[in-house]
Image (cartoon, rainbow, N blue to C red):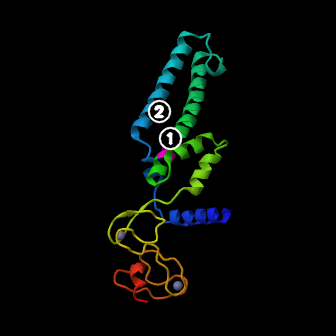
Amino acid sequence: MANDFMGKVKENWQQRAMESTTLRAELRLVPRQLKWVLFAVYVAALGVLVWLGVWMPNIHPFGIAVEPLPLRLLAVFGVLTGIAAGVSFFVMLMVYIGRDARRRGMRPVLWVLVALFVPYLIGVILYFVVRDPLPVNCPQCGSIVSAQFTFCPACKFNLRPHCPECRLPLRAGYRFCPRCGFSLQTDAAMPGAAEAHP
Ligand SMILES: [Zn+2]
Ligand SMILES: [Zn+2]
């Protein structure tokens, strides 16, 4: 059982290593409206604190009581910005995990709860370790299929071809097996097709 789990984790890891993505593309999973809402809340809180600092000098936000006033406002600004950055990062991380889990065919609510409630960010780390690979397009028929499938359920295309000689898993575009040098020559250079002509 534990071995099965570790095997699946390792396989997911290898599949995910083939996903080429950028931080910018990943950040796009977080809706722009949410980023604006977080920014608006930050600006509003800043406005309230400046207003308090100027008009109610007896109230000390975050217990900051330094004089003179400009220095106090600067200190309050610094602390609030730090808190806002931390909170915003956490909120966006939770939204990212929910949306990322959904597009990977995992259970979004479950994983957001795990990320939220398993302490010391262990839930977050666990999610990034075990998450399933992204679905892929079948190179032959274009259907969207789970990266864990071996054959396309729509057209039976071999999605996880192996070298016919040494069984090494191959990637699309290889013309020779990188381990044993077996020639996978076909015009399409598609190892799935190569298996049909050993
Ligand atoms: Zn297909
Ligand atoms: Zn080989």
Q: Is residue 150 magenta?
A: no
> Mark 1 near mark 2, Cβ–Cβ under 8 Å?
yes
Region of the chain picked out in magenta, as a range = 92-98
In the picture as drawn, the residue positioned furthest to the front comes out as: 1
The picture quadrant where one finds residue 166 is bottom right
- How many numbered callouts? 2
**What residue does disc 2 label?**
38
What residue is pinned by disc 1? 92
Q: Position of residue 112 (x, y in %)?
A: 54, 43
Quarter that holds the N terminus = bottom right
Q: Is residue 46 left or right of residue 126?
A: left
Residue at left offset 52%, top offset 82%: 178
Q: Which of the marked residues, 1 or 2, is nearer the chain's N terminus?
A: 2
Q: Which quadrant holds residue 143? A: bottom left
Q: At x 38% / y 81%, what residue is drawn?
A: 193
* Residue found 32% across the figure and 69% down from its top: 141
- Please, what secondary structure does the residue beneath circle 1 have? helix
Q: Quadrant of residue 13?
A: bottom right
Q: Give the residue displayed 39% in from the left and 36% down from the top.
A: 33
Q: Position of residue 90 (x, y in %)?
A: 55, 39
* Residue that protrudes farthest toward the left in the picture: 141
> On screen, 143 above or below 40?
below
Front residue of 70 and 26: 26
